[in-house]
Amino acid sequence: MSTPLVLIHGLWVHTDAWRPWHRLFTDAGYTTHAPGWTGDAATPAQTREHADALNGVGVAEITHGYARFIATLPSRPIVIGHSFGGLVAQKLLADGLAEAAVAISPAPIKGATKLPWAQIRSALPVLRSSRNKGRTVALSPGQFRYAFGNTLSRAEARELYDAYAIPGPGRPVFELTAAKKDPQSPTEVDLHAARGPLLITGASHDHTVPEVVSRQAFGLYSGSSALTEYHAFAGRGHSLVFDSGWEDVAQYVLRWVSQQVPAGHSDLRP
């Protein structure tokens, strides 16, 4: 039986953006899944049309949605998440629901305090109004290019925007900003949990999750006895998992995943 693998998308990007990864990992022998967030529709166009379905959805609801999906699988999967999906992947791993996890330019878990200006600017479309905590927010093409496509041509950034951009719930962003003072923050991860291997990656030109933020997240695990590794992708922005250079990132992740949990591995549930 092949090992299941779950791909978790981030804020403002539909799960359709994982299609090339789905093919790559399936061809490598993994049983690959890419369910959307709670409230996502089947396509980007349908999600845009019914954006209110994401109103009020936060980190806990997103995490619980993936936990429910994982419960339907025959064995614990590998989880790979990008941006907020990377935060969720870390939570699922720490909770014992995954064999291994990869967090690509992950949204900061509680304890990560670095806050570069580029990250603030990327979040301003949400944070400019407290009313956005309970509703969805869509990025303009210009905002998407700054937050995701700053290393891309205008034409490629617009092509990705048209193909994959969706409105996203504002609540997760507000949960990040409140994490330091919230004793029950949904962004908290058990850093000392007995867990499987974890790879965290950063991107040197990322505006939404600057590389220094990803590196600090890795540092928070310094007291863990579980395998935790870090890699930085040079010259890449936040769109690194679905732009024209996606395969370089995916192949690196595939090599790491294959070393930790081979495609034929199966820890069947009782």
Image (spheres, helix red, strand yellow):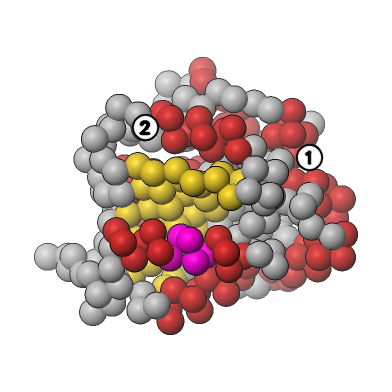
Q: Looking at this view, name the residue that lies furthest to the front.
A: 234
Q: Position of residue 160 (x, y in %)?
A: 75, 65
Q: Residues within 10 Å of mark 1 (few under 14, many from 20)?
A: some
Is residue 176 left or right of 257 when viewed as pictured?
Answer: right
Q: Which quadrant holds the N terminus?
A: bottom left
Mark number, residue 221: 2
Tell me which secondary structure the magenta stretch mostly adopts: helix
Q: Quick check: can you spot residue 30?
A: yes
Give the quadrant of residue 132.
top right
Q: Residue at x 34, y 65 (%)?
A: 258
Q: Residue at x 35, y 79 (%)?
A: 29
Q: Residue at x 87, y 65 (%)?
A: 155
Real-space CA distance between mark 1 and mark 2, rounded to the nearest whole angstrom: 31 Å
Front residue of this view, candidates 145 and 85:
145
Q: Nearer the viewer, mark 1 or mark 2?
A: 2
Q: Residues within 10 Å of mark 2 (few under 14, many from 20)?
A: some
Residue 29 magenta = no
Front residue of this view, candidates 135 and 172:
172
Which stretch appears magenta?
A: 250-254
> Which residue matches tag 1?
125
Q: Quick check: can you spot residue 170?
A: no
Q: Residue at x 60, y 38 (%)?
A: 211
Amino acid at circle 2: Tyr
